[in-house]
Image (tube, grey):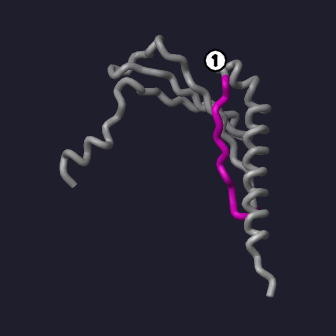
Amino acid sequence: MNTTELKEYQLNKNNLYREEMFTDLSIGGIIRYTPVTPDGSIDKTRKPVFYGKVSIITQMGPIPIQTVIQAKDLQQAIKLFPETMKAAIEKFMEEVRKIEQQKQSRIIVP
C-alpha cells in the first residue's frame, strides 16, 4: 500500500465529533456526538447528534439496534428514548418478517 492509497482514509477535519455514552446499565444507552473543531474545542456552529442504543435478545444471541433520536439536548433525548427505540425495534422486526416471507416464497415443494 502506498501513501496515495492512504489518503482515502483521511478524517474530515470539518466534521469531527466527540462521542459520549450515557447508560442506565440495564436497558440501553444514549450516545451523544458533540461537534468539535480540529483542535478539540466544541464547535458551536453545529448541533450535537443523539443516538439511542439497545440490544434485543434472539435465539441467535443479542442484536444491537441503534437509531437517531431527534433531540436538542440530553434531557429531551432521555424523554424521547422509549418511543424512538420502540419504533426502531418495530421497523427491524418488520424487516425480519419481510425477509422470512421472501425466504418462504422461494421454497419449492416437489
Q: Which residue lies furthest to the top in this view?
A: 44
For the N terminus, the image quarter is bottom left
On the image, the x and y values in percent for residue 26 come to 72, 41
Residue 95 or residue 69, whichever sits in front = 95
On the image, the x and y values in percent for residue 104 come to 78, 70
**Residue stretch in magenta:** 59-70
Is residue 19 rendered to the left or right of residue 78? left
Quadrant in which residue 102 is drawn: bottom right
Residue drawn at the location 74% of the way across and 33% of the way down: 84
Is residue 23 rendered to the left or right of residue 19? right
Q: Residue furthest bottom?
A: 110
Secondary structure under tag 1 reads loop
On the image, the x and y values in percent for residue 13 come to 34, 27
On the image, the x and y values in percent for residue 47 come to 54, 17
Vertical position of residue 16 compared to residue 9: above or below: above
Residue drawn at the location 32% of the way across and 42% of the way down: 9
Label 1: which residue?
73
Residue drawn at the location 70% of the way across and 34% of the way down: 24
For the C terminus, the image quarter is bottom right
* Three-letter amino acid code of the residue under disc 1: Asp
| Label 1 crowd bin: few (<14), some (14–19), many (20+), radius 10 Å | few
Vertical position of residue 74 compared to residue 25: above or below: above
Is residue 10 rendered to the left or right of residue 21? left
Vertical position of residue 93 compared to residue 69: above or below: below
Is residue 22 rendered to the left or right of residue 17? right
The dominant secondary structure in magenta is strand
Quadrant in which residue 69 is drawn: top right
Residue drawn at the location 69% of the way across and 18% of the way down: 75
Quadrant in which residue 106 is drawn: bottom right
